[in-house]
Image (cartoon, grey):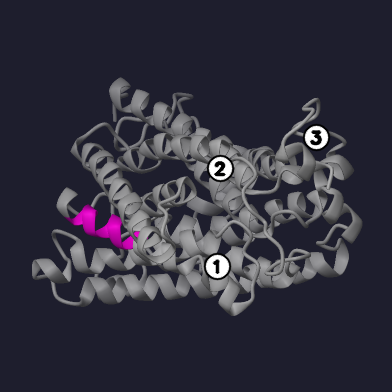
Amino acid sequence: MELDTGATAWMLTSASLVLLMTPGLALFYGGMVRGKSVLNMMMMSFGAIAVTAVIYVLWGWSMSYGSDIGGIIGNPFDQFALQGAIYDEAGEFIIDGFGVPGIVGVGFQATFAIITVALISGAIADRVKFGTWMVFVALWVTFGYFPMAHMVWGGGLLSGDGPFASIAAPIDFAGGTVVHINAGVAALVLALVVGKRKGFGTEPMRPHNLTLVMLGAALLWFGWFGFNGGSAFTADGFAGLAWVNTTVATAAAVLGWLVVEKFRDGSATSLGAASGVVAGLVAITPAAGSVSPFGSIFVGVLAGVFSAFAVGLKYKLGYDDSLDVVGVHLVSGLWGTLAIGFLATETGLFYGGGVNQLAVQAIIAVVAMVFSAVVTYILAILLKATMGWRVSEEVEVNGIDLAVHGESAYEGLSSGSVIKEVRA
């Protein structure tokens, strides 16, 4: 295959856009927490970048796309440290079927692993040890993310080469199962194992800076064009379809969320708009290449509605998912994965395709949930017994930023509600 410079440029751009999503997430999550722990929240995202990028080069790529072991993982030693993944026997760059050097694909896939584990951090904001989080990142991407990527995209159990493909070929265009269901379930398990924040349910824990939240949501939306558009693996019609579907579904989700807020609470809020952005992005991720722009409206608006209601479940069910990872990523990720069974233009139920696509989408979603829950629970309990998850009550009350990182996000401000909260 000859080098296609246009496709290569698109994939390099897409990889850069997806990498930008994690700093965007840091702003989104950072604005949602209280002012005394904003730096710690951001550091959890940047820590995810640092740990995952190194691990991905060493064994992450090989575990994701190396030779299959039991349909669950790729052989971690097959292309350890990218041996055999960059150059062919003649010393030339390996070129994939789209005319893109394989090393570009490595970079693109690494950014997916980074954002996935970073998403989980929102469920345990304000209360965990930074060191334990960093170790969890290394363990979870190894045993939670890489196997899931292999199962779905690397020819494993949940792929078109797996046993469920006899029903219909499973569809996950850009990560409904691998990224959002996986991270959403992990977030729920961690929230349960770590426990609630002090004062959860009895005192207000409002976002301290909605400007940061809105900016973070904007950067996530921008970066998501690389996430979904790049998953076409070249600059073609599927990339264009994914771009349009991503825009339309996200806009529809914002409308869906704001309508729910207006009728339920009396106000359409900026936090609701930003959360609707993320819900729509999550829902269209698995379906971006298989539904029409018209269908993406339904995917998006229902994602906004479903997640707007789902974020309140933590108060009814008593788990402290601090920044609503479960209500947004798990719920909208599940909906987007199942929506393919209804709205895929070639195989969906509403297009005369029967129930097979819906059935296989449900199966891969359930398998992904069970796998993620088991792996995350084992890792969470192991770390709880060895390193411990919680900071001391004093640190939690006074703020993790000063105690753990030795600095404050708002040092030097003389007045205002933010600095008062930092000093609380």
Numbered disc in front, either 1 or 2: 2
Q: Quickly name the residue at label 1.
A: 185
Query: Which three-letter amino acid code belongs to the residue tagged 2?
Result: Phe
Distance from disc 3 to disc 2, alpha carbons, whole Å, reads: 18 Å
Q: Secondary structure at mark 1?
A: helix
User: Magenta includes 297?
Assistant: yes
- Residue 213: horizontal and vertical position, in percent? 54, 41
Distance from disc 1 to disc 3, alpha carbons, whole Å, reads: 32 Å
- Residue 119: horizontal and vertical position, in percent? 57, 52
User: Magenta includes 138?
Assistant: no
Magenta: main secondary structure equals helix
Instruction: Give, as a single range, the part of the protein colored magenta.
Output: 295-304
- Residue 100: horizontal and vertical position, in percent? 36, 30
- Residue at 87% in and 65% down: 386
Q: Quickly name the residue at label 3.
A: 408
Pick the quarter of the image with the N terminus.
top left
Q: Quickly name the residue at label 2.
A: 28
Is 17 above or below relative to 51?
above
Distance from disc 1 to disc 2, alpha carbons, whole Å, reads: 20 Å
Q: Earlier in the sequence, mark 3 or mark 2?
A: 2
Numbered disc in front, either 1 or 3: 3
Query: Which three-letter amino acid code belongs to the residue tagged 1?
Result: Val
Query: Which three-letter amino acid code belongs to the residue tagged 3?
Result: Ser
Q: Secondary structure at mark 2?
A: helix
Residue neighbourhood size for the residue with mark 1, other residues' Cα within 10 Å, grouped as few (<14), some (14–19), many (≥20) = many
